[in-house]
Amino acid sequence: MKLKSKLLAFAAVVVLFGVIVLYVQEFQWFQNYLSPKKMVLGSMLFGLLIGLLLGFRFQKFGEELIDKIQIWSVCLIVSVLPMPLLASLTNRLLAERSTHETQVEFWEEKANLSNIYGYIKGEPKANLGYYIFVILDGEIVRLKSMKPRFPNAAQGDQVAIPVRRGLLGANFVDWQASEPGSN
């Protein structure tokens, strides 16, 4: 294998690892979008469109059918998979700095005591954060917080959540904005 090919393969692995790390870091924000399905599906459709355009552009470099299939596959995968991450980062990092309080109906707040690896018998269960369920526009929305936000709220009470409008129009809850001393 040539040195150029080895460097290209190494760079591809580094980029893939970077995308995985960024997805892990961004996941906490995905959990606090008010309409995550809409944002993820919209960004994947946009990535599909880009992949189709790239596939049409680069298919001429394939001589046989298998080459063209490989080119199309790479173009589609490389453009679709990172698109939700890029959309979320763009939406969140270039969002309006100000938050607005949105009144929602409180449903429930639960401690997240689950561990994907399970527990050893007799081991105390660690609190991994809190799930907050609210009703927004007639639908139950699950939000995540590292600490309880509405300990005295009862089901049906109106509570205010700090919402920021993202650059791409997707609203998300920014618990950090409601902390004392933020902004």
Image (cartoon, grey):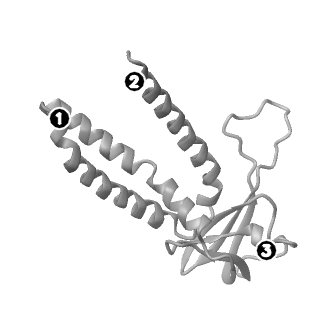
Which amino acid lies under the numbered mark 2 shown in the image of this protein? Ser
For label 3, the residue is 183
Looking at the image, residue 66 sits to the left or right of residue 126; the answer is left
| Residue under numbered circle 1 | 62
Q: Distance between the residues labelled 1 and 2?
A: 19 Å
Rendering quarter of residue 75: top left
Q: Which of marks 1 and 3 is nearer the N terminus?
A: 1
- 176 versus 6 height, above or below: below
Q: Is residue 43 above or below residue 165?
A: above
Q: Which of 20 and 90 is in front in this view?
A: 90
Q: Tell me the mark number nearer the camera, choosing from 1 and 3.
A: 1
Q: Which amino acid does label 1 sit on?
A: Gly
Which callout, 1 or 2, points to the residue nearer the camera? 2
Which residue is found at the position 31% from the left and 46% from the top? 76
- Identify the image quadrant of the N terminus: top left
Q: Which residue is drawn at 69% across and 69% down?
A: 174
- Whole-percent x and y of residue 172? 61, 70
Q: Residues within 10 Å of mark 1 (few under 14, many from 20)?
A: some
Say which residue appears at 12% left-offset and 30% top-offset. 64
- Label 2 vs label 3, nearer the camera: 2
Q: Mark 2 points at which residue?
A: 5
Upstream in sequence: badge 2 or badge 3: 2
Per the model, the C-alpha gap separating discs 1 and 3 is 53 Å
The amino acid at mark 3 is Asn
Q: Which residue lies furthest to the front in this view?
A: 3
Which secondary structure, mark 1? loop
Determine whether 28 is above or below 68 in the image: below
Helix or strand or loop: what does disc 3 sit on?
Answer: loop
Element marked by disc 2: helix
Answer few, some or many: residues within 10 Å of disc 3's Cα (few below 14, many 20 plus, some between 14 and 19).
few
